Image (cartoon, rainbow, N blue to C red):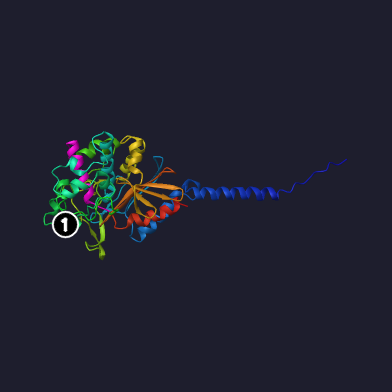
Amino acid sequence: MKKCIKKWNLWPYLIMVTLIMNIGMLKAEKTGDPAQHESLKDFMDQNINELVQQDKFSGTVLIAKDGEVKYQKAIGMAHKGYQIKNKMDTKFNTASMYKMLTGVAIAQLVQQGKLSFDDKVGKHLPDYPNEEVKEKVTIHHLLTHTSGTGLYWMEFFTNAQWANLKTVQDFDNLTNTKPLAFEPGEKFSYSNSGPLILGLIIEKISGMSYDEYIRTNVTEPAGMENTDCYDMALPISNVALGYTKRNLMMQEMDEWHNYLFVTPTKGGPAGGGFTTAIDMLKFDIALRNNKLLSKEYFDIMTTGKIDARPGKKYAYLFEDELLENERIIGHSGGSLGVNNTFRVFVNSGYTIIILSNYDDGMSLLYKKIKSRFIQ
């Protein structure tokens, strides 16, 4: 007697498996985790190369997850005249990105009980020449750009001796007698003068110069060997010159010009120090491992306090942004021939570091990267 062999119809099962796989792929895409879909290397190489071909990007890029490097690339010229290429350990001007180090320094002093976020400037700088600032402005105001102090760029570039301005006091003297633009705490208004006052307070409390304090308490503990406020009038090795196609009035020019005649020769608390992509990853790791600050004070420093613009708050010299299901902290920096960003994607564990010695190099690339990580 022949056995009856039942033929199973596999089509329903195949359809079900296909649906499950498709749903899984969609979920992976929505996580924003590059490891779950298109190759990160292919994506990054394609977008960087497109910008390079258009002569719109020069610099270094580093992407890490939980402190582990997933992608890195150096491209373009550190010095066009001598045809010196950018490398991963090339030092780039940070512009305002350096403000984060000032924020860390202040938070350290508060953590040590030597300072309070509510302290008035006059408590620590009783001889400060601006009475309004002494009596009304707090450390909190200075850290959140709500102090009413302004910028100092016009005063800097109209100063006949601008190339000789080196110390924190030199820069603060440019604007420290100007009246406040508004009552402290009234609104957010980005200021470079505010961090200068913070730098003076760091010097007064610590008994060190600003640069010495940062080296001793921030960069050296983090292992950041190539980060400092270098004096560019001196020979500094492995540094990228900035290149701009704009003049001081922000008018477009046809040819690349180096930025040596449109930028301070030395940085400080408001920005202008130099760093490498590798050092900024070390900064990220040191912060998140609580080597520079306790978790309590790291959270205080990076948690948004003031609405800066829609979707983005400003913390203590850190930005705090919430997009979809991702929280992003860090800071960018931009000036003529400088365009950088340091962004930590808190929920997914990714860190994005882009240092560019072109006017808009970082902004164009980060926009593409961000669209990939934020689904």
**Residue 19 as seen in the image, left or right of residue 2:** left
Q: Is residue 170 above or below residue 294?
A: below
Picture quadrant where residue 108 is located: top left
- In percent of width and height, residue 138 lies at 24, 45
Residue lying at the far left of the rendered structure:
160
Residue 148 x %, y %: 24, 53
Q: Give coordinates of residue 71: x percent, y percent.
A: 40, 46
Residue situated in front as seen by the camera: 356 or 248: 248
Q: Quadrant of residue 117?
A: top left
> Which residue range is magenta in the image?
190-209
- Is residue 8 in view? yes
Q: Which residue is mark 1?
A: 155
Give the residue drawn at x 32%, y 43%: 280
Local SS, label 1: helix
Can residue 167 be seen here? The reply is no
For image coordinates 61% across by 48% down, the residue present is 20
- For the residue marked with disc 1, what is the amino acid? Glu
Spot occupied by residue 208 in the image (x, y as percentages of width and height) = 17, 37
